[in-house]
Amino acid sequence: MEKDQSKIIREQAPRSATREHSVPLYLTSSFIFDSAEQGRAIFAEEEEGMVYSRYANPNTTEFINKVCILEEAEAGLAFASGMAAVFASFAGFIRQGDHIVSSRAIFGSTHQLFTQLFPRWGVTHTYVDAVDNEAWEKAIQPNTKIVFLESPSNPGLELADLEFLAGLKAKYPDIIFAIDNCFATPYLQKPLTYGFDLSIHSATKYMDGQGRVLGGVIVGKQHLIDQLLFFIRHTGPAMSPFNAWVLSKSLDTLSLRMDRHCSNALALAEALEGHPEIADVKYPFLPSHPQYALAKKQMRAGGGIVTFEVKGGKERAYRFLDALRMILYTSNLGDARTIATHPASTTHSKLSEEERLHLGIRPGSVRLSVGIEDKEDIIGDILQALEESK
Ligand SMILES: Cc1ncc(COP(=O)(O)O)c(C=O)c1O
């Protein structure tokens, strides 16, 4: 049987009468019916066929099929952005009075959903520290509908124990266990194979890999995806066919790019560990990471993100960022180009100082999304900026 890489390279929307080699871009809002009877039959779901690009399009279907292959998922749906996917993974299931258990270290906009939006609809949440296995079950209430997490977390790179959580899922089968798998990508980590129900991605990150388009995707159990299809069909957060076309092409090279992101990131983490100007380095595949053994068990490699703390606090971090020559400062991640970010003043600026410190975000913390340039150039730029910012 073909392996994943061969399968996704060969996965393609059905060839048209033009006999194209590469998949065309299906920029069409709707699809014609050959007859009135066919229109009726497709609407009645007696016959399969595309109707309208809000709920299916050959480009988005091709993209979803590839993510399903990578995640070993039964089914999936594509969204206009990662946040549209994250939002749908809750809004498609919750009712007034429901409760969500979530890891504390999550993407800022997901935190805003829990704290600003869902309380308006009578939906409550409890945060747990992802590394604390016992805390998960303690947080579950009779009205808990969804258990949600990110692993590795942003930017602290803490891990949740996927096998342990899948055990909890088996004990509470009615609760939906969902993971934002964006940082790991399905190449490095396959949560559904442990027993998770849904895996969510901001495709904007590593799936695109070149910082061009927004996208999101949810893959998982068929019966849950069917419920979500109702939600997207009637609320409209669909991915554009153009973005799906770009993202589907990008998935063909995901494994190659991830291998390079990961080997560059490990080389950088090793070069920074013990450096006199660095207070701390976090990378899941560094033996000094508190969950190194768990990382080795559940991830193929350590990922493309390295978080480190420069000595000298916020002022030093600012001087360091301003001294970088090749590496750019922007808030995206997962790009072929290395990107530096200062989480305390940007992505996590809405949190209190206390909340930030709890997540390991210090004034001198820098998050580096390590690109696929030559590793000597990445490490060289970081070392010269450390020297320059002394
Ligand atoms: C872990 C994680 N989840 C979700 C998102 C949101 O994705 P998007 O920007 O595509 O809406 C991001 C974006 O940075 C992210 O890092």
Image (cartoon, rainbow, N blue to C red):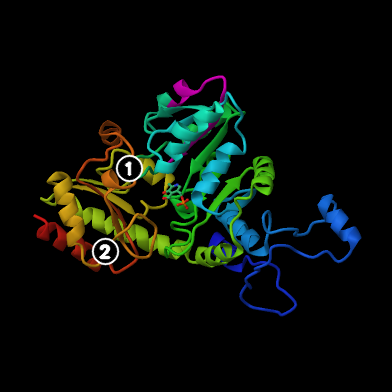
For marks 2 and 1, give the CA distance: 21 Å
- Residue at 87% x, 60% y is 38
- Residue at 91% x, 59% y is 37
Numbered tag placed on residue 327 in the rendering: 2
Relative placement, left or right, of 28 versus 139 is right
* 4 or 337: nearer the viewer: 337
Instruction: Tell me the crowding category of disc 1: few under 14, some 14 to 19, or many 20 or more residues within 10 angstroms, Cα based.
Output: many
Give the x, y percent position of residue 321: 21, 57
Q: Assess mark 2: CB under 8 A from ligand 1?
A: no
User: Can residue 120 be seen here?
Assistant: yes
Quarter of the image holding residue 153?
A: top left
Numbered tag placed on residue 348 in the rendering: 1
* 4 or 238: nearer the viewer: 238
Looking at the rendering, in which quadrant would you find the N terminus?
Answer: bottom right
The reply to whether the magenta stretch includes residue 65 is: no
Relative placement, left or right, of 73 versus 200 is right
Indicate whether 17 appears above or below 194. below
Q: Amino acid at mark 1?
A: His
Looking at the rendering, in which quadrant would you find the C terminus?
Answer: bottom left
**Chain part drawn in magenta:** 136-150
Give the x, y percent position of residue 232: 65, 47
Q: Amino acid at mark 2?
A: Ile
* 334 or 294: nearer the viewer: 334
Indicate whether 251 appears above or below 192. below
Indicate whether 366 appears above or below 63. above
Instruction: Tell me the crowding category of disc 2: few under 14, some 14 to 19, or many 20 or more residues within 10 angstroms, Cα based.
Output: many
Give the x, y percent position of residue 3: 56, 61
